[in-house]
Image (cartoon, grey):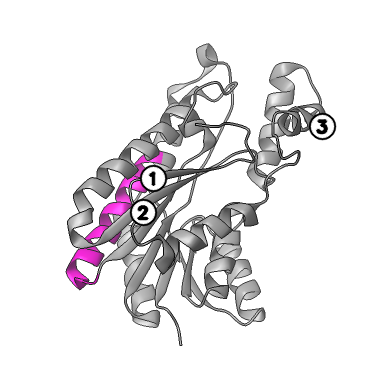
Amino acid sequence: MSKGLAVVTGAGSGIGKAIAKRLAKDGFSVGVTDINQAAVNATISEINSEGGIAKGDVLDVTNPESISAALETLEKEFGKLRVWVSNAGVSSMNHFVELTEKDWDLNMDVNAKGVFLCGQIAARKFISQQEGGKIINTASMAGKQGNVPFLSHYVASKFAVVGLTQAMAHELGKHNITVNAVCPGFVATPMQTRELEWEGSLKGQTPEQVKQGMIDVTPLGRLETPEDVARVVSFLAGEDSNFITGESIAINGGAYMD
């Protein structure tokens, strides 16, 4: 029997895909959402082929109508919402003095406003159901410390997610809604592959040299995997985390300790 509907944004690849697959394995009916329809279809296919239950829809986290429409479609298929994971994110890189307003706006719109809009719509749904719920946001190691090269706009967006998570948790606790965030470190994803090239170009290094630098500052001695993040999201989505809220949990192999 399904544990109910868990919606994951940005589930077409990387961390979001791993989260969607893990929540399906945990027994949730998973709403796979992403801006890319082909990526949605691919994740659904993998989940269903592995014995899970998943359907999906295109979702633009910067558009409230798109979020609401996707949720409505998924509820018709799977019933009441139980877990919402705001994972969709973007990045770009440049020296602070070379960043454009377009760079700033894209990162803030997707990474920060997207979490706000999705969280608001999910919270309204949970409140109307009067049965509590769980909201999990993807922040970043860069949401806890700004000593990150060429990512000042991204850092700002992820600090916003950490603060918003706390504010949401404070207001929504009376409705038995927990709100937490995960803060991944150097995760081996398609996004990171692009960032290795960008950072290497800006530093005059090869992508492999940049990658090795990440490993060197990680006490556990390896890059993080999307599944490392998904395991913690699984915990936050389950009953064992029922008395945890407002936390932003570091998952970075010790690369940054707070």
Provide the major secondary structure of the magenta segment. Answer: helix
Q: Which mark is residue 208?
A: 3
Bin the neighbour count of mark 1 within 10 Å (Cα to Cα): few under 14, some 14-19, many 20 and up.
some
Secondary structure beneath label 1: loop
Q: Is residue 136 magenta?
A: no
Secondary structure beneath label 3: helix
Bin the neighbour count of mark 3 within 10 Å (Cα to Cα): few under 14, some 14-19, many 20 and up.
few
Secondary structure beneath label 2: loop
Q: Residue at x 63, y 75 (%)?
A: 45
Above or below — where is 160 with respect to 115? above
Bin the neighbour count of mark 2 within 10 Å (Cα to Cα): few under 14, some 14-19, many 20 and up.
few
Question: Can I make out residue 105 in this image?
Answer: no
Front-lying residue, 243 or 99: 243
Give the x, y percent position of residue 99.
51, 19
Residue 231 as seen in the image, left or right of residue 64 = right
Residue beneath disc 2: 244
Q: Residue at x 38, y 50 (%)?
A: 180
Front-lying residue, 104 or 25: 25
Query: Which image quadrant for residue 102?
Result: top left
Q: Nearer the viewer, mark 2 or mark 3?
A: 2
Q: Which mark is residue 247?
A: 1
Q: Residue at x 57, y 59 (%)?
A: 231
Q: CA distance from mark 1 to mark 2?
A: 7 Å
Residue range in magenta is 112-131
Q: Of callouts 3 and 1, which one flags the residue occurring earlier in the amino acid sequence?
A: 3
Instruction: Give, as a three-letter code, the residue at label 1.
Output: Glu
